Every structure is written in C-alpha cells, then in structure tokens.
Amino acid sequence: MGQRTQAGILVAPAVAAAPGEGLVDQLGAWVALVKPRIVVLVVFTAVVSCYLAANGSPRANVVLVLIASGALSAGGAAAFNHYYDRDIDARMRRTLGRPLPTGRVRQPQLVLVGSALLILFGVLLATTVNLELAGFELVGAFVYAIIYTLWLKRRTVLNIVIGGLAGSAAVLGGWAAIDPRLGVAPLLLSGVVFLWTPAHFWSLALARQSDYDGVRVPMLPSIVGARSTSWWVLIHILAAVAVSLWLGAVAARGPLFFVLAGGAGLVFGAGGLAMLRQPDEKTGYHLFKLSGPYLGLVFLGLFLDTLIGALWL
C-alpha cells in the first residue's frame, strides 16, 4: 500500500532492492528515467533535419555531436520530468511503475542533479558545432522541463500545446547545425512536430482520462469532454498532414516521401475519424499507438528521399 503525505498525495513507499535486483536492474531503472523512446524520436527528427539541410551529406562529426548532445539534453529534461512528477506518477496507472514511485531509484535528489548535469553537458557539447545548435537544445530542454513540466502541466489546458515547442526546437537545432539561417523548410518541418504533439498526447489523455482527473492535471478531455477533444485531435492531424505535404513540395521531395508521408497520413487521419465517431478509451489508445509511427514514417520518408537524392548528385 502507498502512504499519504501531509498534502494527501498517495505515493509509493521507498523500498529496498529485491534480492535478485542487481547492477543490471539498477542500471535499467536509471536508464528508464531519461525516457529512451522519446529521446530516440527527438534525436531522429533532429538528425533527419540535419541531413535535409545538408542535402544528404552532413559531416560525420556534426551528426555524431548532434546525436550525443541531443540525447543528453533531451534525456536530462526527461529525468527532471520524472523527478518533479513523481508524486502524481504514483497515483496514475500508466506511470505508477516508473522507477521513482516504485522506489527502484531511492534517491530522487540524485535524479535532479543528474538531469541538470545531462542538460549542461549536452549543451556544452553542442557548442562544438555552433552556438545555434546549443541554443536550440537549451530551449528544448527548458521548455520541456520548466515551461511544460514545472509551470504549465498542472495549471492550464494549453500545457501540451506550448510544451510541443520542445520537439520543434530539436528539429530547428538539427537544421541549424548545418545552416543557422532558418528558411521556410525547417519552419514547416518543426511545424509538423508542433501540430502532431497535441494529437499524440490528447489521444492518450482521452484513453487515460481517469488518471488525469484523479491527479487534477487539466488535460483537454477533462476540460471540454471527449467529443470536443476528438474534434481538436482531428484538426491537428489534418493540419500536420497538410504541413508535411507542403514541406515535401517546398523541399522538392520525390515520390518516396509523398508515398510514405501521404500513406501514413491517411492511416493517422482514419484513426482520428474513428475516435471522432466513438470517442472512448479504446479508440483514444489506438490513435495514440498510431501517432508515433506516423511521425516516424514522415521523417523516415524525408531521410530516405534525401539520401537517394544525394546519391544521384
């Protein structure tokens, strides 16, 4: 059973390591704090943006620094999110198994220190490429850790809308690593991520509305209801798909990109329509599971198309 603090928040008690819990298990717990799947997606979008800016031929050292610095700064921001949200994570079925609520990581203060160091090292490493990359990575970490997690998440329904700027910053950073002069293409590319983010998280919020209601986090379904949320999700899906195709035209991408981005967009849009027809936990979770592959396929299409274009030059 959990224990109640003076504020009445149910939290999981700190527990001793299980007898079979060894170094590998402890390492796994610490790795989980940086949200590896999210970090991989953030870094991937930044790398694709970098390749697009370099017409498929960026310098290897730039790509390596972009990957390492992006992973450090994004991972540090994710660790801060784990640290700050450990109270509500212990009360939500989706997150109660995370390392801090379960006590697998028993010193939260070390997570706070570690998150700051990861962000610092990441930003400093990025300066070896240019200050613009470092600036965008700092902005991305600041938006996610401070603006979204610390300030907006528990206060306003716009939390994830503004928080989506963190992902956009990663894309702009990837482009700036090659060309600090940002034109229409990188702005459209970052716009795809910005528009995709609310659709991704609002569908999850619909699927886990009772969780968010229980901890009083004002996600959109809790404020406007499931039907209105479904409309807003569909609007963001259609906008993200439209901007992705606009980007393809502006960046003169080939058929491969349009097949992947357009096909993924059709599936994503169909999922949005299904949720609109029946806005419930099942359709919300299904759309949430579709949203990640959609974004991945859009950026994969850009990446492959750019590489093919570079080979023909």
Image (cartoon, rainbow, N blue to C red):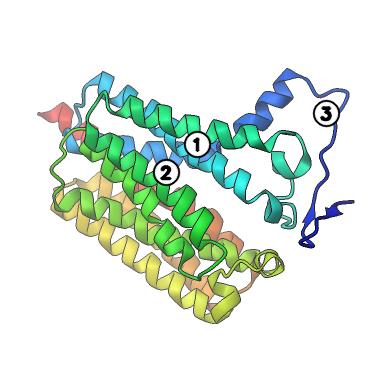
Towards the viewer: 206 or 214: 214
Quickly name the residue at label 3.
Answer: 17
Q: Quadrant of residue 181?
A: top left
Quickly name the residue at label 1.
Answer: 76
Rate crowding at label 2 as few (under 14), some (14 to 19) or many (20 or more) other CA atoms within 10 Å. many
Sequence-first disc among 2 and 3: 3
Q: Is residue 98 above or below residue 210?
A: above
Quickly name the residue at label 2.
Answer: 141
Q: Amino acid at mark 2?
A: Ala
Q: Secondary structure at mark 1?
A: helix
Is the Cβ of the residue at disc 2 closer than 8 Å to that at disc 3? no
Q: Amino acid at mark 1?
A: Gly
Sequence-first disc among 3 and 1: 3
The quarter of the rendered structure image containing the C terminus is top left
Rate crowding at label 1 as few (under 14), some (14 to 19) or many (20 or more) other CA atoms within 10 Å. many
Sequence-first disc among 1 and 2: 1
Residue 136, given in percent of the width and then of the height, sits at 30, 42
Q: Is residue 151 left or right of residue 212?
A: left
CA distance separating discs 2 and 3: 31 Å
Residue 142, given in percent of the width and then of the height, sits at 41, 47
Q: Amino acid at mark 3?
A: Ala
Q: Residue at x 50, y 36 (%)?
A: 76
